[in-house]
Image (tube, coloured by chain):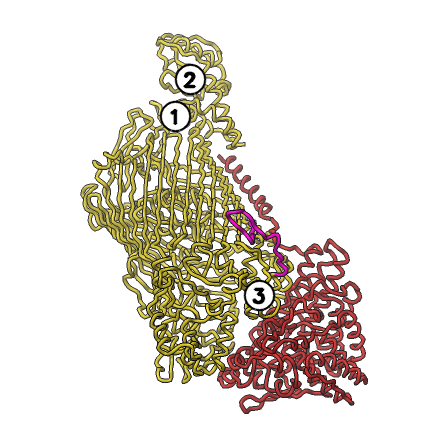
Chain colours: A yellow, B red
Amino acid sequence: MLLKALCKSYPLGKLFTTKTLLIMRWGSVSKRTESHRTSSKKIILAMKLTAIILLSACLTASANGYSQITLSEKNAPLQKVFKEIQKQTGYNFFYTYELMQQAGPVTVKVNNVSLEKALEMSLSGKELTYEIISKTVVIKEKSKESVKEELPPPIDVKGQVVNEKGEPVSGVTVTVKGKKIATATNDNGEFEIKGIDQNAILVFTSVNIETFETKLNGRSDIAVIAKTKVTGLDDVFVTVNTGYQKINRQNVTGSVVTVGSKELEKRNAVNIMQNLEGAVPGLVQYRGTTTIRGVSTLQANTAVLVVVDGLPIEGSIADLNPYDIESISVLKDAAAASIYGARASNGVIVVTTKRAKERGKTVVEVSGNLTLINKRNYDYLDYMTPSQQVDWESEIYNLYFSGGLSFISNPITTFESNISTGVDISPVQYGYYQFYKGQITKAQLDASLADYKKNDFLNQFRENAVLNQQLQQYNLALRVNNGRFQNSFVVNYTTDNSGIINAYDKKLNLFYKGSYNVGNWLDIDYGVNSIVGKARSHNNAFATDPFSVPSYYSLFNSDGSRASYSTIRFNIYNTILETTPSLFSAKFNHLDELGRDFINTSIFNSRYYVNLNFKPMKGLTINPMFQYEDMRRDVSAYSEAESYTMRWLNDVYTTRTGSPGNYTYTKLLPVGGKLNTSHSRSPNYTARVQANYNREFGEHGFIALAGTEFRQTNIYGQNGTLLGYDDQLQTQGTNNVNYGNLFNINRGTFWNPNYNTRTRHFAEISNFGLIRDELHRFASGYANLTYTYQKKYNLFGSVRKDYADLFGGDEKYRGRPLWSVGASWIASSENFLKQFNSINYLKLRASYGLTGNIRNVTALLAATTGINNTTQLPNATVINPPNPQLRWEKTATTNIGIDFTMFNNRLSGTIDWYRRKGTDLFSLKRLDPSSGFTSLTINNASMVNNGFEFNLGYEWVKPTSIDGFQWSSSLLGAVNNNKITDVDELTRNPYTLASGGSYKVGYPVRSIYSFQFAGLNTSGVPQWFDAMGNKTIAALGPNDADAIVFSGDSDPKVNLSFNNDLSFKGFSLSIFAVYYGGNYYRARPVPRSYPYAGYGPLPSYLLNSWTPTKTDTDIPGSGQYYMPAMHNQYDFSDNLVRQADFIKVRNIVLGYDLPQSVASKLKSTRIRLRLQVNNPKSLWTKQTDVYTDPETGGAQIPTSFVFGLNANF
Amino acid sequence: MKKLLNFLAIVFIISLTGCAKYTDITPKGQNLLNRVGDLDLLMNVDYSGSAFNFNKETLLIDDNYLYAVNVPNTISSNVLTLDKVFLTYNESADRAALTPTDAQYEGFYKIISTVSNIILANADNASGDLSLKKQLKAEAYIIRAYLHYLLVNIYAKAYDPATAATDGGIPYVKDINFEKANAKLTVKEVYDNILSDLESSMALNALPDQPKNSMRAGKGFAYAVKTKVLMSMRDYSGALNAVNTALTFNSTIEDHRTLLSVPKASRVLSRNGLNASDNLFYSYYNNYDPTIYAPTYEILNNYYEPGNIIKDSTNVYNYGFGFFFVGLANIPVWYQVTYQGNSAGMTTSDLIMMKAECLIRTNKVNEGMDEINKIRIRRIAPYSPLVASTEAQAMAYLQKVSRIEFLFTWRNFVDLKRWNKEGIYPVAVARTINGTTYSLPANSKLWVFPFPQSATQFNENLTQNY
């Protein structure tokens, strides 16, 4: 109905001038405050009214001249009187017939009086008043105010506050001097005050601008230029966008951190999450996961909810254009996040994209950034050098062929059989074989070994296949704001060479957003955002891995041509595949395969939205919103016919019949390439209707909202395979493939009966299937209220009820009310604190509330469809028992916080303490297995996160002018302690516990549990302590669960970030460093013992292996001292665990703003150059005896250099 | 203003009631088990994996050593593990404390509860093909009987007519109820239930003569299970009837003689697990069973007949790997991944050997020996028939042949447990490792495996049966 009304009103609205609209609104609003009708009826009424006024305005002929008025009417309708006045004066009249009806007839008799007098006489005794605007008389109902306050008639003022650069200034408090009327500017610097004196004086105050006053002098539309206060610190008065509402920071009771574009643009980032590191205390991004105030769940969703321009999105936050972000708010406690109810337990990130702000101007922003990333470094793997490896292998294979390895009984025959069955063989091993066979002399052997030592495969690979990763980002934004229309069009293009030859990753992000102000009663926002991505990566896992061959191999022959060697699946000394005409070569070269076998990924994600903003009456807005997201992803992996993948598959699926010398080979696969495809689609929508009410009554302020939201997510797709595919000819031969025959080849090729054919290859040639159609729905209703008294005391309460499609769940549990309360006190507004000049602002906050989380499980007895792997027939399995009591997880958060600015705004900060108690967490509860299930997922665990956060900023040097020297620092930190307080401990099995298969009460969720290493025994075999404290080499059993020790939490307990900003005359320098610590990780590689060298590089710890003469080591014996490992306890041994604390400089940014004089010659308002270094070498790491980086657990994040240019026109 | 708020409140409430309906959706990919076709999918169980791993049972009876675990190290270790208890026949060890979980107990009951019982509970109300519905019910009864039969043999004493009514058995689970703990029945009650399920299945007369694949039950398998159960209950004539019926559906025996036609180096023993023609019901732990199993000195020296084709005429037994895996000199491991043994199901070999014993035990010694020789002729080269003059002599031959025929499978465990309980033809179990001999008395409580803690902690009815 609303939409229909909107469509009707549109053409009318276009005809209005600003003034008529203003009058119309004035009348309709004041009338409505009196009447008690429903809001939708109001809108219809407003439509009617508009039409009527318009009609009367058109019909009324305008007359000229001015004269004294003489009237003599008895019991005449008012209309008649007005017509008479119009005739005599030429003034037009605006009124509604309804008003005239209500007023009834009048008796009036005047002689030669002024217009005002005549009107007063005509309207005396009626509840009507008038207003003269230009040559128009508007007749309207008397409002209470107008009854109280005498003329001159009040006016409505709107305007915009901009700074010297023309940028809008938000959060400026606009007060009417001498009155209690006040408002604040919105994000666009706009404000509106109604019903004030024509000659009122407006006072503009804010922490970022110098306070100033302006006299209205009857102006109703003003633009004021504020002088920026020169300060580097972020103010505390900006508005906070929670996604559901925009609220002044003063009124917030929860813990919210807002990062503005100024802060975000300080550093270049590919992904906006990178820019949030160190900007939000409590937001921790560590090893690929993002958490806000610690982990809050065991089994449910751990993803932070991302909200863009008011609505949650399903797409990735990484897809958002980092150049187009106005602000990001992170909602941390319940009072802030509870409005998101059952999806808020992991915290909420609210992103607001930029919009056209500057009125009457077209703004063009152009940016380009080039990021050069150092080549990936493999040092962390700590392999032997080629020379060390040749020596190590020589020693082993000398023993091997001389019978020195007790477990190889007939080395020569075993080895020859290995050649014929295609077992992997290293060249050193083959050399010793030839030597022991007498085929070569010791001198020849030594010569070839010396040659091998000269090679360095890894180095060649890094030179020829690995590239310096190069990332280019371009951004173009066009923004137009003519006051009623706002349009932004943003194009972002990024291209990345992926750091390896023949690969790329390109993405184009197009975003059009607009808003249209239909009238003072309606705004429409709409937008389309499309992301088109194309990426090519490599499909052959051997080719991208420099460690798929021994380190002393060479990529090239001595003549410079590409060398051919084998992979671990075969050996170069067996020539059957090379010499048999109908078979394909099994030879391999990394560079060849990096050009033949690709995965092409194409994505197309779009998001469409329309938001309406009705303002039917003062203080009330009604907000229907709708968003549709469509995410499409297509992956096609094409292995060319010549690729190793296809050659090998063809050979593997070739059968041989006949006798030696007279073999017949039958190919089961069609000759040609292979195309594996996968298509997934994910259409999602969110619809919301919300009412906001925001009004002040004297010292009492109310900010309220209520709404309802419906949301659906969906994903589905298919996979397929084409065999015998030729991309050029567009032919394929899958039709002729007999999959039954292919499946029946379980093990064995004609050269190796033990080759695991089915497990290794059947899936890649028969990748058919569905991505299960998964549909979820969420619905909710919510409301919240902030009450403010004297602008000092705020009380907040919220309630929300959520429903989700817990299939089969009891309806009673499907919806769960979640709520929160909060209070804040701006102590600095109290008189007793005002005497302390050092305190500029002080606010105390406290909140408590519940948020939820869900895991999509089926509560009903139902089976999921799968495949019987033995018969290959579809089957169904009942995975979980019926459990209708499944319900939401609940996280109760208590938060106490303080915000302050002190010492003439030099020091500012926020400190928060919190306790998050999660209950009803999904976890496994054990059942008697004779019920058919060993465990059941129910809501029966709980955990607690305790912590505090702080954010301190200090301005060391305040500039005296905008170009002056300025230096400020900020220090952010968070400490979080996570502990499980209740869980069903599922196992007493030491190995299961150590490998992460269970939780323990009293310990963190991400605990590391380890076996206690007890040294090597006298044979070089590792031992561990059992529960009695005895050393043993055997696997520990259930009685030894207590022998498992807690080796620390793998999540960082403490993280700090330290930022320094300096600027002078257009130059700026910012240095940003981080510390993460208090956590542990399995830092050392698990020392496996090697009976002999494998086919690949060898870890350098082998050089430190146990021998009878070298017992001071924890590396088990290898080679002749090799003992097969009896269990995998070393994987989780405490001697491999290290503390993960580190300090790193994250980036150093040097920026330069070209002087205005230079920029303006280029027709630009601002040109900025930037040089940024990311991740230079770590400043400090706690552990120095390991090669892995504590931050990643693997290679250190490579250093990168960013060159950027940014211009505005 | 008030009316406006009222209006909003009403809108709010209406939308909330709408929420419940809006979120009431049936997910795709979920089988609601209310159509016969859905239940048929449920019946396509993959009877493989750790639930069908009978290592601990075959280790107990000295068929094999540990599965890829060093034996001397385990014995010399001061850590007490179940491996060590079974290797050394340590009766005083608290086995229950060493058994936190048990894949067999959990796996078998999972199939009983979530396949058989759901089919039996839902079939009558399910829509679809009536004859398929009957067949599914018949299959469900057989699977339920078969798995309970395995469970009662593992966790309770062997059936003894004298004490079965009081010997503790296992829960016989026939309903879907996650609320109440299942009661532990006596051994007799369990066997009565097994027989009753077998009767119910056969009464439906709906099993196919030949199932669509060997992971589905057909008549041959149903009668094979019945034979096993009746033999356990010492009803040899009843069992003979059942096995004769079973043999009418399949009597093809696996033949190893074909290996001899090629040179020894090229002899690759192979068997297609699912499609082998001697399958009655196919079930396994790993699809390369019995690869990795290491036979004991006693099996190698006392049970293998000279001329056994696999042992003496192929490279199936790999001595190098043997030392690698179990650390004992001259112990090989079976290493032939192309052979997919039916380690946890049943084959026609079961029928032949069961028929042989039923004949021998019912005074038909010669006929029984003929059956035994049907197996031997396909296993031994050079072959000569065995002849027995007495029941005891015939049983001694049968016990030797059957031990090798069913090496590394559950049948040897169940047979030895039965014979030792019966006491007429007991089979002594003892092993010597590095000079020390460990023996398993016929009445040892080790024959009864402990219920795992994962069961006893959550079902107080489950007291141990030893």
The quarter in which the N terminus of chain A is drawn is top right
Residue A312 percent coordinates (x, y): 46, 46
Compare residues A90 and A766 and report the one nearer the observer: A766
The residue located at (56%, 59%) in the rendering is: A763
Say whether marks 3 and 2 touch (CB < 8 Å).
Answer: no
Left of A170 or right of it: where is A894?
right
The front one of A964 and A341 is: A964
Badge 1: few (under 14), some or many (20 or more) residues near its Cα, within 10 Å? some
Residue interval drawn in magenta: A717-741
Q: CA distance from mark 1 to mark 2?
A: 14 Å
In magenta segment, residue A719: yes
Q: Identify whether A99 is placed above or below A375.
A: above
Q: CA distance from mark 1 to mark 3?
A: 72 Å
Provide the secondary structure element on which disc 1 rests: helix
Q: Residue at x 50, y 20 (%)?
A: A98
Instruction: Residue A862: name its quadrant.
Output: bottom right
| First in residue order: circle 1 vs circle 2 | 2
Residue B299 colored in magenta in the image: no
Q: Which mark is residue A935?
A: 3
| Number of other residues with Cα within 10 Å of mark 3, as a class: few under 14, some 14 to 19, many 20 or more | some
Q: Spatial distance from mark 3 to mark 2, Cα to Cα?
A: 83 Å
Does dot 3 land on a helix, a strand or a loop? strand
Left/right placement of residue A182 relative to residue A753 reads left
Q: Which residue is mark 2?
A: A124
